[in-house]
Image (cartoon, rainbow, N blue to C red):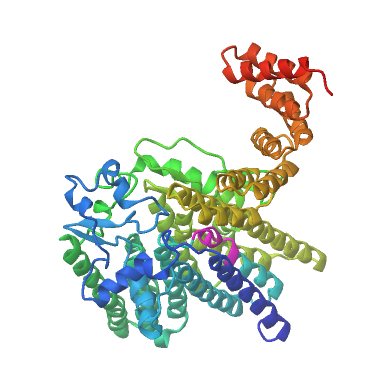
Amino acid sequence: MGLRTASSRALLALVWAAVVGAYAWRCSHYVSELGDGSAAAAYYNRLVDGFSSGQLHLKVEVPPLLRQLPDPWDPATNRSIRGSMYASNRLHDTSYYQGKIFLYFGPTPALVLFWPFRAVTGSYLSHSAAVAIFSSFGFTMVTALWLAIWRRYYSKVPAIVVAGGLAALGLATSVPLLLARPDVWEVPISCAYALVMLMLGALWQALHDSTRRTVWLAVAASALGLAIGARPWLVLACPALLVPAVTGAGSIGVPGRRRRLLTDLVAIGLPLAAIGLCLALYNLRRFDSIFEFGQRYQLAEDRQDAARHFSLTYLWFNFRVYFLSVATWDSRFPFVTGVSSLPPPAGHAEVDQPFGLLTNTPVTAFALYLLLRGRESFRTRPAELRAFVGIVAGVFAVGAVTLCLFYGTCTRYQVEFHPALTLLAALGGLAWISSTQGSRASRRAITTLWLATVAASVTVESLRSWHGRVDQLVARAAALETERRPFQALSLYQEAIRSSPDRVDLRYQAALLLEELGMTSAAITEHEALLQVDPFHVGGCNRLGRLLANARRGAEAVRLFHRVVGMQPQYPEAHFNLGLAFQLENRHGEAIRCFEETLRLRPGFPLAHRQRAISLQAAAVPRP
């Protein structure tokens, strides 16, 4: 059937549009640029401003206090100067060297997107918009690649199967998890993802278009070189560029083989050498070393010049976290609450709860099928397809091994290798379905199983991404509270509540903030909404009871404090609060018993003595 039918084209276009639309929607809901809310304050735009002014450091003022520190990279002494992760005008995660502030994140995003956007429009591009653009470009590249594979080798496979694979390549690759916080940390990763997908597409063309192989190899090498400028570890993926050159030279007669191989190697080497030389000079001019990107001089929560960034001791731990950690579930939306935690080895940094790919994304099982059983079906396929599968497997292996050796374990790092793994899984799915023999009913059953596996993977990752987005909103709100910006913090809590209305911890924090701001009526409403979700939330019952008591709504306060006493009978404050509520209702006999129970539990409670005396006096006075 292929792409010749209108229904097939419409289905695939719909999946592509849905994925890109989801990317854009997720990023459009992220408003913070390092706590400032302005794209002009984004680190990459400050780098662009520096480039435009003829300098390699950020165009920011260096705080005089930072210059005066005897050891400016000590996290304990520079904390108040660099600011927290979401503080406004912060310097967190920049690099300080010889009195200047640099960006240790790779320069490629600034060169290929931020600077051109600024030059053409005169405006600044936000980090979140850049992540959406890079992610969408990467998905578009893998879409074109996926359709090319289908047309050339699996044209008899139904379009619905290919559409399912396309959905997995867009929504089961950890890219949705990256979009939960599309800020400066995610910009170079999404940029590298886009360029690696471009490289894979160019290598596919180089394998299948012998007349223009040299051109496609130059494109692939340029893409990988720029990707190295975003994520330097990708230099380890350079051997993948040699595969089309070597396999292509083998198909040419002996007289022309060496000349064509040399031409291909030049096409690969020139872009890599040019970009590599530029990166070396960039580092040399900034840090007096061609190999230093600035991480050694980073202003961070932990000291980078003393950290052991790569070690074999991290390998097994990181592998278990990235591939085998199991999601924890809850009965309330978004249902996925995190992953099971493991104690990290010595020297390892904090774990950012990545997502176990093999245990939580069932579509990856088809990558295992490709490895264990799919090779049989590929033996009958052309050498070009086998070579391409080897390239994708190599890119995945390089990314996975490198990140498993690294001292940090972060959700966003999964985008370094998960897309390649999902592409292998999709290829495994095509190999499995195309090689299946049997009745129409059995083929339909297999197709249904494939689509169900894709749907489960997309659903689980989407829910985990939703949970991650809410966590980021809460983290930013807490930072704003620390900066004494309560109204902005309240806005973020309310946005988080709209995303996860059943999260009682969010409602409780919002209610406390409303109390602090003197918005009593709104605080009462928020506490009441909290107790509708969890009627036995002790903090909610206590706080709402006090608010109702202050509003002279004693009967309602009595019911709430009765509930607290039932839950925590050994808690003296619960009995004391109930006694105060009884006083409001002129039920002094019951109030006296509550205050006496309070004093039994805590004999030295002076307020309980005082309120007991008041109730004793009131009870002794006859009512008119």
Residue 573 vertical position relative to residue 183 in the rendered view, above or below? above
Work out whether residue 227 can be spotted. no
Q: In this view, does 246 lie to the left or right of 334?
A: left
The segment highlighted magenta reads 170-181
Residue drawn at the location 37% of the way across and 48% of the way down: 406
Q: Is residue 447 visible to us here?
A: yes
* Magenta stretch: includes residue 509: no
Left or right of 43 in this view: 321: right
Q: Position of residue 70 (x, y in %)?
A: 16, 45
* Outermost residue to the right: 624
Q: How many labels does the image show?
A: 0
97 relative to 38 in the view: left or right: left
- Nearest the camera: 358 or 125? 125
Locate residue 362, reporting x and y percent.
Answer: 63, 54
Residue at the image position 61 percent from the left and 64 percent from the top: 168
- Quarter of the picture containing the N terminus is bottom right
Q: Is residue 179 magenta?
A: yes
Q: In this view, does 556 lie above or below 416?
A: above
Vertical arrangement, residue 540 with respect to residue 236, above or below: above
Q: Where is residue 74 in the image (x, y as percent from the top left)?
A: 25, 44
How far from the left and from the top, in percent, is residue 572? Answer: 64, 20
Nearest the eye: 441 or 502: 502
